Image (spheres, helix red, strand yellow):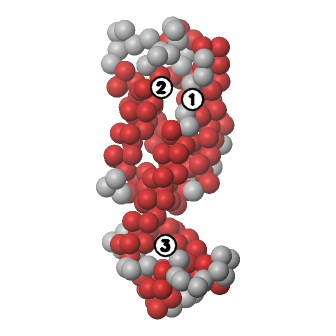
């Protein structure tokens, strides 16, 4: 934040507006096709105003990626599968929270979870965290847990695009369907 600016000042509002418009444009057209002039035009501001808050387009983009990464990982790290009695219920609650996060940030999710080079790394981290949380609760004696976990992450990725963002299904519905598909009672052994 520039020195001397008060919280909720018009400067803070201008910065937030530039970020919001950048998120929309980056998600729609991608990083390379979006120009600073497009962002300031969409925000109805000037390029000098842009440079008050951001060094360049790359720094703005990197800030947005970092914002998504931090919020996404906060959600993923909150995954708690609970004890044996409420394992399925807790997992469904966690998946619902993740889908709600995506639904509340669709443009930022398109950038951070699909378009950036870092998105694959994020999905790998997500897979590792899920594997850690689930390996103590689900029996995988005849199957490779990594295939199971990666298929869940892939399903979440695909369902977010095809059903959540299109508003065909609500977060609760998607989480419930995932649980019903992946965690039938006969899979739960511990």
Q: Is residue 23 above or below residue 49?
A: above
Disc 2 to disc 3, C-alpha distance? 35 Å
Per the image, label 2 sits on a secondary structure element best described as helix
Disc 3 to disc 1, C-alpha distance? 34 Å
Instruction: Write the residue at 34% across / 46% down.
Output: 120
- Structural crowding at the residue carrying mark 1, measured as other residues with C-alpha within 10 Å and reported as few (<14), some (14–19) or many (≥20): some
What residue is shown with label 2?
Answer: 133
Residue 115, how many percent across, how many down? 38, 57
Circle nearer the viewer, 3 or 1? 1
Residue 94, how many percent across, how many down? 59, 34
Q: Is residue 44 left or right of residue 148?
A: right
Pick the front one: 94 or 174: 94
Instruction: Look at the numbered discs 2 and 1 and tell me whether their residues touch, using CB distance below 8 Å.
Output: yes
- Report whether residue 18 is seen: no
Mark with earlier residue (3, 1): 3
Instruction: Write the residue at 56% across / 37% down.
Output: 78
Instruction: Look at the numbered discs 2 and 3 and tell me whether their residues touch, using CB distance below 8 Å.
Output: no
Q: Is residue 12 above or below residue 136?
A: below
- Structural crowding at the residue carrying mark 2, measured as other residues with C-alpha within 10 Å and reported as few (<14), some (14–19) or many (≥20): some
Per the image, label 1 sits on a secondary structure element best described as loop
Mark with earlier residue (2, 3): 3
What residue is shown with label 3?
Answer: 22
Per the image, label 3 sits on a secondary structure element best described as helix
Q: Is residue 156 above or below residue 72?
A: above
What residue is shown with label 1?
Answer: 80
- Report whether residue 78 is seen: yes
Circle nearer the viewer, 2 or 3? 2
């Amino acid at each position: 934040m520039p020195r001397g600016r008060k919280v909720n000042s018009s400067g803070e509002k201008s910065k937030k507006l530039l970020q919001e418009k950048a998120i929309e444009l980056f998600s729609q057209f991608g990083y390379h096709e979006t120009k600073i002039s497009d962002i300031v035009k969409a925000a109805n501001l000037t390029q000098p105003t842009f440079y008050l808050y951001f060094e360049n387009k790359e720094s703005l983009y990197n800030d947005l990626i970092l914002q998504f990464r931090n919020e996404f990982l906060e959600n993923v790290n909150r995954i708690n599968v609970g004890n044996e009695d409420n394992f399925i219920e807790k997992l469904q609650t966690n998946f619902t929270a993740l889908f709600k996060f995506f639904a509340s940030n669709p443009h930022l999710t398109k950038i951070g979870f699909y378009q950036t080079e870092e998105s694959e790394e994020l999905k790998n981290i997500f897979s590792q965290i899920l594997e850690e949380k689930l390996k103590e609760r689900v029996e995988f004696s005849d199957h490779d847990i990594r295939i199971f976990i990666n298929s869940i992450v892939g399903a979440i990725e695909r369902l977010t695009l095809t059903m959540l963002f299109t508003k065909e299904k609500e977060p609760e519905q998607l989480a419930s369907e995932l649980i019903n598909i992946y965690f039938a009672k006969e899979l739960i052994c511990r």
